Image (cartoon, rainbow, N blue to C red):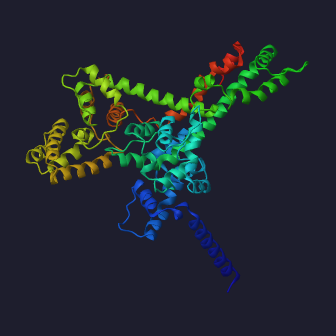
Amino acid sequence: MKLTSLFTLALATNIAVGSSNWFSKAAYNKWHENELERWLSDNDIPYPTPADRKDLEDLVQKNWDTYAVAPYKNWDTDKLSAYLKSKGAETKGAAEANKDSLLSQVQSQWYETEDKAQQAWTDTKDWILDTWTESTLKSFADKHGIPVPQPRKRDTILQQVRSNYQTVAKKAGETASYPGDWLYETWSESDFKEWLDTHGFPAPQPTTRDKLIAAVRRNSRIAYLKSQEQMNAATAAYGTLTDKIIDAWGDSQLKEFCDKNGISVPQGTKTNELRALVRKHRAQLLGDTLSDSAARAFGAATSKAGNQYAKATNDASLAAQEAFNEVVDTWSDSRLKAYLDARGIPVPQASKTDELRALVRRNSHKAASSFNVWTWDDLSYQHLKEYLVNSGDSAAKKIGESASATREDLVKAAQSAYASASKGSGDSYASATSYLAQATQAAKNNVFDTWSESELKAYLDSYGVPVPQGSTLNELKAEARKQSTYFKYGTTNPVDTAFAKIGESVKGAYQWVLGQFGAGAEEAKKAKNEL
């Protein structure tokens, strides 16, 4: 045998052995069959039933890389470009349309290496709880009798819940590697919706509790990675802020700070030495040992980065709520009632507009629970005609075949046919829901793209939204998408809002930091403005 052949054989053998070792060490190899099925189901990957363990494991292995290790490989070009832009990367020219190029760029700027991702999945308790709110952590601890020392701060609760994670699962007779619904037993529907909103993931529509759990569970890793990246950014921004303030101070302010905080200053200490002394004690005075009052002023968590993350997340949620409230203020009574009807919320008779708006705001985090007559509202002209013609309803079919029927005519006919079918709950209802599922999935990425100007204006008019004169077609489409998103999801999914503004949140804490330093120098104020 030639030397080159021997080398090729050896190389192939090493690669095969290496691959075998890697697959044998993959986290899912130790999962229970229920966990394998759960992971496949969460990611909408069909699997045979019944299926033996080998079939399930082979199917997980086939999809593991593109769903667990490098989920961006399943993204379309728009999502890839959006991710790169959030990282400050340029995506101009041909690269913007070239998916392979975008994938390569995203891979180089992804939150973690593939090796780290593989390792992370071997112990989910290390990260799956980190994006929970203080409230959901408290509920979990109380439900399972986990003792939490006072004061019950978020970091302390998180630590206690994490250390008892395996014990709780074992007592419940459940698996913990890819946890089942037991982990979210104390969550309300609003908790799920708020989590998805805060971390930038759309709530499934129509939704059920099982679908909400699946959405949170499958997105928990990316949410955790986002939060870690942004907490690191918060730490850096916080350091920059205090550095600039310290650099702006003169001797008298530096000495005043040291005196106020009991820091001994040797005689003859130079200005740069004073600054070094202040920085040395900064971590102790303004870091992990923040007093309770300062912690409340800075946020709810115990670390400065955690505080800023919590504050930024909270600010984003408030901003989303305020934006939702502003939109709701323009909605017509019929649209407000429709929002509530789509969520199964009873509307008292003779409710006034302000009462309807208040009821809508109280349910801003409630996802639409099922298909309903309003689901037809933003389907395309062609989708509506196809449904009516094939609905089995003779009156609906007649309107669907009419060449003169407007989109408004089609919507009313579809809503009427659906309402009649839903009362019977027979074949016609099953056909309607099946068609809706297909149509909404097909229209998900291009809703309103084919609509005419008059159709868009009529749609916006149904919300009571005035259309400014001179609005372009693209502006009308953008406004229609915004209104549709609010109607379907309640508060919008802020995607990057909760995280992208975290540096601004640190700047917003400037006055508190300055107060702790005990100075009000104009030079320091200028330093803040330079950030």
Find residue 356 and report its horizontal and vertical position in percent: 27, 24
Horizontal side of 248 relative to 135 (left or right) equals: right
For image coordinates 17% across by 45% down, the residue present is 422
Find residue 480 and report its horizontal and vertical position in percent: 32, 33
332 or 449, which is in the foreground?
Answer: 332
Find residue 272 and report its horizontal and vertical position in percent: 84, 24
> Would you say residue 521 is visible in this rendering?
yes
214 or 165, which is in the foreground?
Answer: 165
511 or 385, which is in the foreground?
Answer: 511
294 or 81, which is in the foreground?
Answer: 294
> Would you say residue 110 is visible in this rendering?
no
For image coordinates 54% across by 34% down, the residue present is 500
Q: How many labels sit on residues?
A: 0
Horizontal side of 375 relative to 73 (left or right) equals: left
Horizontal side of 234 relative to 524 (left or right) equals: left
Find residue 292 and report its horizontal and vertical position in percent: 62, 25
